[in-house]
Image (cartoon, coloured by chain):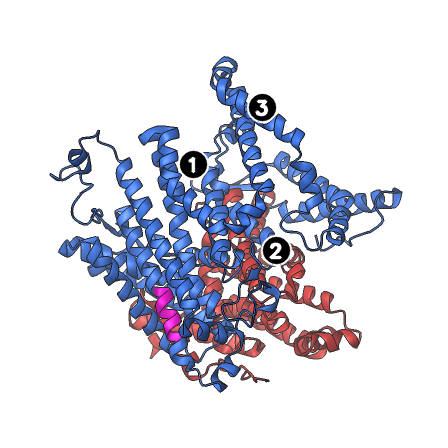
Amino acid sequence: MALAESSKVAGGENNIAKGLREAFYASLIAFFMFVLLIGLKTDQNIHNELILVPRWGLLAAVVALTAIGRFVHVIYIAPFLAEQKVVDAKSGLLPTTIAKRFFSKRNLIIGAVTAAVLLAVGNDIQAAVGPYWGVYVGMVRGFAIVYVIAWAIFYYRRFIGAHSYSIGFTLLVIYPVAMVALFGFQGSLKWVDNFGIQILIYVMLAWGLNIVVGLAGLLDLGYVAFYAVGAYSYALLGTHFGWSFWILLPAAGAMAALWGVILGFPVLRLRGDYLAIVTLAFGEIIRLVLINWREVTNGAAGISGVPKISFFGLISFNVSDPNYVAKVFGIAQSGAYYKIFLYYLILALCVLTAFVTVRLRSMPVGRAWEALREDEIACRSLGINTTTTKLTAFATGAMFGGFAGSFFAARQGFVSPESFIFLESAIILAIVVLGGMGSLGGIAVASVVMIGGTEILREMQFLKMIFGPDFTPELYRMLLFGVAMVIVMVWKPRGFVGSREPTAFLKERKAVSGEFTKEGHG
Amino acid sequence: MQYFIQQLINGLTLGSIYGLIAIGYTMVYGIIGMINFAHGDIFMVGAFVALIVFLILGALFYSVPVVIALLIMMVVSMLLVSLYNWVIEKAAYRPLRGSFRLAPLITAIGMSIALSNFVQVTQGPRNKPIPPMISKVYDVYGISISLKQIVIVLVTAILLAIFWYVVNKTALGRAQRACEQDQKMAALLGVNVDRTISITFIIGASLAAVAGTLFLMYYGVVVFSDGFVPGVKAFTAAVLGGIGSIPGAVIGGLAIGFIESIWSAYFSIDYKDVAAFSILAIVLIFLPSGILGRPEVEKV
């Protein structure tokens, strides 16, 4: 990618020669990179010895794809992007000219008609053509629906931009209802639980970490430690003493905040990358203690049977209880009620986090955080107590991590150290940075894209039809996640939302580009 | 006493491997000021390449002398892993140079996730054991020293000597140190900064590849997730020694190795990583820029 000198002279023999040359180099590099790791697979034979299984066909395919990709990139994409950069220096995610061409009225009509026809008779067609081609029918239907929605978003982007928070909130509130309406109670389970709840947990975690990284500018690589503290607080106290979630939620938050202060104290003097490594170390220490302190935490086996949350003790979600939800309302039994309840609960917790963050930003402590991020020395010269400022940031961020943790424990019904590995911290930090640090909306979008995107790979069963039954899309989930992190970051280094609304201003409020805000030195 | 010396020798072996990885971290940090999170996974890829070369050698020839086999493994691993790091630097870090500080950190974490999952997908998630390559053990006054350990320490020492020579005596090393101090000024004086940075990544990767080969030889087993823990410990070592300082990385690596082996011998093997990380935290509280690190000068 960096090899491509963005040539302004589009077309011509010269360009094709260059493309071929670059493609040749790329295929050479790809060949050497993959000759051992893709070309040969280590496998165990029946004697438990390692043997090599050649896969030259796959290697050839990968090398050829690399060459073609490189050729297309050099010949078409790079000059095109260079041109677009000049034309639309200021427009948003996509250059407007292409977007306008892509979202034309003609395409909308085609898309809408396809979607309508396939929604009406798609199932019949699928039944008629058999499972193999039926998959493609489903795929086309999915793309057509997504296109129509994207079209609407594109043409109403002004309106959406102006009312993004209220629209987003409304969509989130009606989401489970819509899912139940579309798929029925049992069918909605997956969409509400794997997508809705999962994404909202990450939104909450990322908003919590945003206070530490985005507002106070302290790089924390061990945030998952507080998540673990919250989860284990609820799991241990809930299973041993049978206390209610509603008592333990604030308790878990307080416990995590306390740990935030305890871990924050020693690192007050550290800056930048030293802070990053020590927080990473603390995260690992907490995980290792959870694994090894078997008497209390039951080690790597984890704690199971974590009690469910009840609706303030009035309505229970345990089938055996007398006040079980189905009995209270006289409706059919289903696991979906609990999931829907959990969805609204985590939504409420997210709203709480957002509310607190927004309010804190306009309070003295929030302004002190942002001042600390911009310039620590100036901060100290103006008489801001950096010790308490840093500690409050750590504690507040940790508290939300603790809330999310106790919710997580209740939702899973099971906690083990496996859930609190460094990868989780990395994912949360990636969401914060990809969302554009400090921007709540951007972070929410980033978690929908990253978490929803990897979850949806589990649903891509049609890929099995294309690549054969051995193909398991789940395996590629984290590989694609990592690659997506790199691509999004290179594409938009400032994250999805690269501008910020200042909290304090003179005369008029206007958004400033992320380029002008600093990220702090830790 | 013998027991203690035994532990020191074990620690020296472990510390050598950590030191080799830590140099890659510290050099990259010194020159472009970023934590190269993917470096641990580069080390793991090095171990896997060595494993596959070992299996190829086993399949092609009836028997290969161990020294030659080890040498071939190291050289192939160094070449291929250097290529990996070179490509990663070009694709993921160079476009973000001059961007804000967290951007390359995130791409590095992304690369780390992608690399380990790439190996998992292509080579399978299982442990990959190989038969022991060297099994000779010497007994010196009741202290057992295995030939493997001697090889590791020897290879590390030779590499460090070459490396020291390159950094301190050659034009390349001078260019590197110049870029470390002031990239703009170095560029004005005719140093090719991009090339120097690429070479830094290549050197770091080759040292990590050797560390991976030695790791495979020492433990005889490797798995796709092996990059993380040694990577984090090597990074800890680099920070402990003072990040950006090359002798610091070696000292830090040895320190972590000693702490780990002595802690697991005298206290509890379960908590050896906890001990290493705790000591890191304690050292940094009293010496906030590591053992040999230069204190950060704040300019206003």
Label 3 neighbour load within 10 Å: few <14, some 14-19, many 20+: some
Image quarter where the C terminus of chain B lies is bottom right
Q: SS class of the residue under badge 1?
A: loop
Please provide the residue range marked out in magenta.
A390-398
> In terms of depth relative to the viewer, which is nearer, A447 or A46?
A447
Residue A46: which disc?
1
Task: Give residue A455's quadrant in the image.
Answer: top left
- For badge 2, the amino acid type reads Lys
Q: CB under 8 Å between callouts 3 and 1?
A: no
| As drawn, A185 above or below A370 | above
Chain B on-screen colour = red
- Residue B41: give x, y in percent of width and height: 53, 57
- Residue A91: give x, y in percent of width and height: 67, 52
Q: SS class of the residue under badge 2?
A: loop
Q: Which chain is blue?
A: A
> In terms of depth relative to the viewer, which is nearer, A337 or A506?
A506
State the predominant SS element of the stretch in magenta: helix
Label 1 neighbour load within 10 Å: few <14, some 14-19, many 20+: few
Q: Is residue A395 magenta?
A: yes
Image quarter where the N terminus of chain B lies is bottom left
